[in-house]
Image: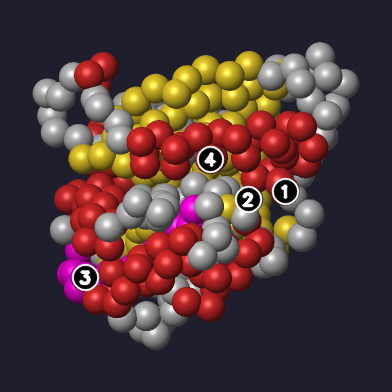
Amino acid sequence: MKTATSARTHTTARQGVTHFLALGHSIALWRMPHHDEVYLAASDVGIRTVDDLSLEDTAPGFVMAPFDPAKPAWHLSAQVLLTFKNQRLHAAQGIDEATGASLEKVDTSARPAFHFRPGTHPNANPSSYPALVARCVQAIGDKKFEKIVPSRYKDVPSGNTHALVDFFHALCDRYPHALVSLVSSPETGTWLGATPEALASVDEQHVFRTVALAGTKPFVEGMDVRNVAWTQKEIEEQALVSRYIINCFKKLRVREYQEHGPRTLVAGNVMHLKTDYEVDMKAIHFPQFGTVMLRLLHPTSAVCGMPLEASLNFLKRHEGYDRSFYSGFLGPVGLGHGSHLFVNLRCTQVFDDRFRFYAGAGVTQDSQPDEEWAETEWKMNTLASVVL
């Protein structure tokens, strides 16, 4: 990587995205939760598969992995890394002065040449989702599962699919608690999202973090979250996820962890129950702990079910479509602030002529099909309310 150049403060993220996409590069644009900086990574070698992803040793870049754990993750190398503050370029690595000057001259009204994959229409019929939920409830009643998380998708035609950088900034403003991301490459297609759920992270102090996030209620502006009444179903749904994380610690013979929660988290127009977990990897003398935990955690019971393998097989047989990167994971790796991966929730796959929204709902013995359908609608509206 070329040495950092002086920042050209008039360049915007939109100009950076437009410039590198015009060159045929792959790009990832993201904003971490509760941070102001926006990062843009670009690569002219595409985005490559990683068979054995390491949280501690992966080259700097951005990672995106599918829901199916049998499929490899994808790594976009940060050949170029631009940092923006207040929507203006603050720092740059990997570019020379000529490229910096070219960035400033990019027409801000130009349409970015996003990598749109050909639109496919999966076999699943969205109207059959209540029937799928009923089948899940029956399977739980037959003691095959404790919990299962069926999902669905919805295609919405749109002529605004080239305004993704504007939508990215709107999501940053509306959802400060979320990882907001925009990824576009020939291999993955184009995805936009705002996810509140951390999967696994290792920071520069070698502290591992993860969360148990489950249970869903609609949120209305002005509600006092301190007085939210969670039902037994929702409490148990979140407790299942917490127990799974603790069992992972036990498998690795780790008892030195911190647990905070559960507490109510507002995520756009919905609320969840959240418990945070931390492990000091230096204190337990386990330098690869983050990588090992990632393998155990993905896919989480919050997006798949319990027991994990049986739930995964059930969903592959009965959902009727490939989730692709929905409910997989994504995030920056190997950069100065560490590696931070999030579950890819509240996301949309973007085609040239439409948005495809995804959502799922945790089903237990007490679930009602119509209520779970409504929950998926709330979740899809997190993004739909911004881009449509």
Secondary structure category for the residue under label 2: loop
Considering every residue shown, the one lying at the far front of the view is: 142
Q: Quadrant of residue 316?
A: bottom right
Give the amino acid at mark 4: Leu
Q: Which mark is residue 156?
A: 3
Residue that carries the numbered disc 1 in the rendered image: 295
Q: Which of 256/162 is in front?
A: 256
Mark 1 neighbour density, 10 Å: few (under 14) some (14–19) many (20 or more): some
| Camera-nearest label, 4 or 1 | 4
Measured along the vertical axis of the image, is residue 185 above or below residue 233?
below
* Residue drawn at (52%, 17%) of the image: 260
- What whole-number distance in Å separates the C-alpha atoms at marks 4 and 1? 18 Å
Indicate which disc, 3 or 2, sits on the residue closer to the N terminus. Answer: 3
Question: Closer to the N terminus: mark 1 or mark 3?
Answer: 3
Q: Position of residue 204 (x, y in %)?
A: 68, 22
Instruction: Return the disc, 2 or 4, that comes first in the chain's sequence.
Output: 4
Span shown in magenta: 147-160
